[in-house]
Amino acid sequence: MAKIILTHEVTGLGEPGDVVEVKDGYARNYLIPRNLATPWTKGAEKDVTAIRKARKAREIATLDDAKAIRDSLQSKPVVVTAHAGESGRLFGAVTTAEIADAVKAAGAPSVDKRKIEIGQPIKSVGEYKVSVRLHADVAATLTVKVVAG
């Protein structure tokens, strides 16, 4: 088992700044090459406080705030404009960054692109459901309308 420090959120494993133990191969072949984690050392342990401090600054303060943001996100769909061909198929796919920008442009509270989870890649014009993790206990289901532009 390898002891690592998460630098980004990994679904099912932990938040940035968490010290976790995972199997050696998972750490060596997946987490560390993708910069999702760093190996645990005594020197790196000092970085954990800096990572946690940065996470607290970005995090939504209370559960009530998260629920209010969830209600505002779920109340109206977000429109994303993308380049599409005649058949409605997109040139590329809609990314989480584009969805985060569309949320901000719609006047809703800004959402971190790393908190947005797209099930299947969005590659055609239409309406899709996307999950946004706002807090440890609160997730919002966002309706994304993709239109040709």
Image (cartoon, rainbow, N blue to C red):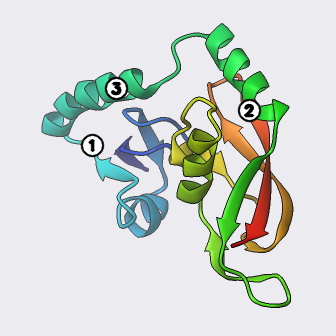
Residue 40: which numbered mark, if any? 1
The three-letter code of the residue at mark 2 reads Leu
Instruction: Give the left or right position of residue 124, taking residue 8 as reference.
Output: right
- Which numbered dot is residue 52? 3
- From the image, tell me which residue sits under label 2: 73
Evaluate whether residue 12 shows in this view: no
Judging depth in this view, the residue of 20 and 113 nearest the camera is 113
Separation of residues labelled 1 and 2 (CA atoms): 38 Å
The image quadrant where one finds the C terminus is bottom right
User: In terms of secondary structure, where does tag 1 sit?
Assistant: loop
Comparing 69 with 14, the one in front is 69
Q: Would you say 108 lies left or right of 38 here?
A: right
Residue 128: % across, % down: 84, 57
**Above or below for 43 versus 80:** above
For disc 2, the neighbor class at 10 Å (few under 14, some 14 to 19, many from 20) is many
Q: Residues within 10 Å of mark 3 (few under 14, many from 20)?
A: some
Tag 3 and tag 1, C-beta contact below 8 Å: no
The residue lying at 70 percent from left, 22 percent from top is: 137
Point 58% across, 43% down: residue: 105
Note whether residue 87 is visible.
yes
Give the alpha-carbon distance from disc 2 to disc 3, as whole Å: 26 Å
